[in-house]
Structure formats: structure tokens, C-alpha cells
Image (tube, rainbow, N blue to C red):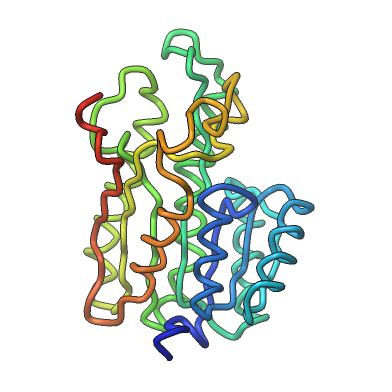
Amino acid sequence: MSIDRPLAEKTAFVTGASAGIGEATAEALAARGADVAIVARRESKLESVAERIEAETDSTVLVRSADVSDRDAVRDAVERTVDAFGQLDVLVNNAGIATGSDTTVETMPAEQYRTVMGANVDGMFFVTQAAIPHLRETSGIAVFVASFAGQYPRPGAPIYAATKWWTRGFAHSLAGSLGTDEIGVTVINPSEVRTEFGKEYRDRISEERYEPNEVTEPDAIADAVAFAAQQEPPNVVSELDLYRRDKFSTF
């Protein structure tokens, strides 16, 4: 490990890596020396991300197309990552879907509910389940991208908020069971971020809803993830809140 490349000789696995926080995180980890497996449903977009990161860093990027709600696809992606790089040191559980901004509990279609729960809850579980044995071998770190919405009631998005409360509860409870194995668990809580988030069920994605400098940029979240990933046993960043400075004035 060097000061310039603190994650050299480590391997990271990043979900939801075709855009936004996931893409920025893969780039940040690679810039710090890690080889990275990037996972999402859009393979062509992943290929473009991988090509750019490899051109800008000395790291190798492995592309794996998978829906995180598909347990078999997730297991295959994790195993292929370990086969390619020999180990897994950092898991970044980032993939997620937003509910429709005008959809209430009463009006939410069952298909939308199941899709959001599949990505935000089942996906977090399946990816973590597949990664734990490999993280145990390296005393690795699992980073969960949660949300401000998982800490405070969000009347406008109760189902989405519930998935993020689940993420935090799962991650912190997991930390208690894995800490004795020297596996670190970190929760990152952003407030609004400028990304493609919401493209499935919203009329406008967050990239279009906010003016420049109005919300956090993905790079800031990626830097927080990278900071957590650099912690060595016995230390771990348990939880990191990354809000814009005026957040509570508008809450």
C-alpha cells in the first residue's frame, strides 16, 4: 500500500455502477489502486464506464451484467470476480430504485412495490450473502449506501424510505455478527444527490430536478465510500452522514 494508492492489491465489487454514485465510486476506488468489478443491468453502459476508468487509472475493471434481485446472477457475479482477481476486499452495496414521486401507498401498483423491494431489500441481502465468505478471508469491508430517508420519516416516499431504514438496520445488525470475523460494515447516508436516480418510476430524474450546486454530487459520496474502504482492522467507519449544509433548514 502507498499513500497515492492506498487500495493497491485490493479488489472491490460495486453494484449499481453504470451511473451516478456507483460509477463515481468505482472510479474513486480504482484511482486509489483497487481492481474493481462493476455490476448493473446495463452492460453497454458498464463497458463504457470500464473503458474510461481503465484509461484513466492503472486498475483493471471487470464488467458483470446482473440484476441484484436475481440471487443466482449475483452469486455468479461475485464468484467470477473472485476467480478473476483472487480475492474480494471491498463490497459496495449501492444499487437501488426510487418509487414514483406521486405514488402513495394506496395507489402503488404491486409491480412497482415488488420491483423496488427486490432491488433495495432483496438485492442488498443477496449481494451481501454471496460476498461474506470472501470478505471473511480478507478481513474486508462491506459498505452500504443508505439514505437520509432511512433516518427521518419521508411522508412523500414511505416505501422507498422503509427500504433504506431496512438497509441501515440490516447493516448495523450485520456488523454485530461479523465484527468478530474482522469484517467491517459501514453505512453511508447521503441526502439528495445529482444522479439518474428515479428513472424507473419518476417523470424527472434527480439530474434534471436540481440546479447546479443545489444538491450533492456523486463524487462526494464516492470519496466517502473510498475513505471507509481504506480503514484497516480493527477500525471501521460505522456510519457516515453526508448532507448538504442547508439540509436541516429545509427539512
Could you tell me residue 42's position as x and y percent? 73, 48
Whether residue 206 is visible here, answered yes or no, is: yes
Q: Where 240 sits versus 250, above or below?
A: below
Q: In this orientation, does residue 251 appear?
A: no
- Name the residue at the top extreme: 106
Left or right: where 227 falls relative to 68: left
Compared across the picture, whether 69 is left or right of 49 comes to left
Q: Is residue 44 above or below residue 203?
A: below
User: Does residue 199 appear to the left or right of 103 in the view shown?
Assistant: right
- Residue drawn at x 45%, y 52% as measured from the top left: 125
Which residue: 76% across, 60% down? 47
Picture coordinates of residue 207 (x, y %)?
55, 34
- Position of the N terminus, as image quadrant, is bottom left
Residue farthest along the right direction in this orientation:
44
Residue at image position (41%, 54%) is 220
Query: In the figure, residue 198 lies in which quadrant?
Result: top right
Query: Which residue is at a point 39% across and 22% down the rendered structure image?
Result: 157
Image position, residue 82 (x, y; %): 60, 78
Front-lying residue, 32 or 147: 32
Which residue is at the far front?
Answer: 212
Q: Position of residue 188 (x, y in %)?
A: 33, 53
Count of picture labels: 0
Quadrant of residue 83 in the image?
A: bottom right
Q: Quadrant of the C terminus?
A: top left
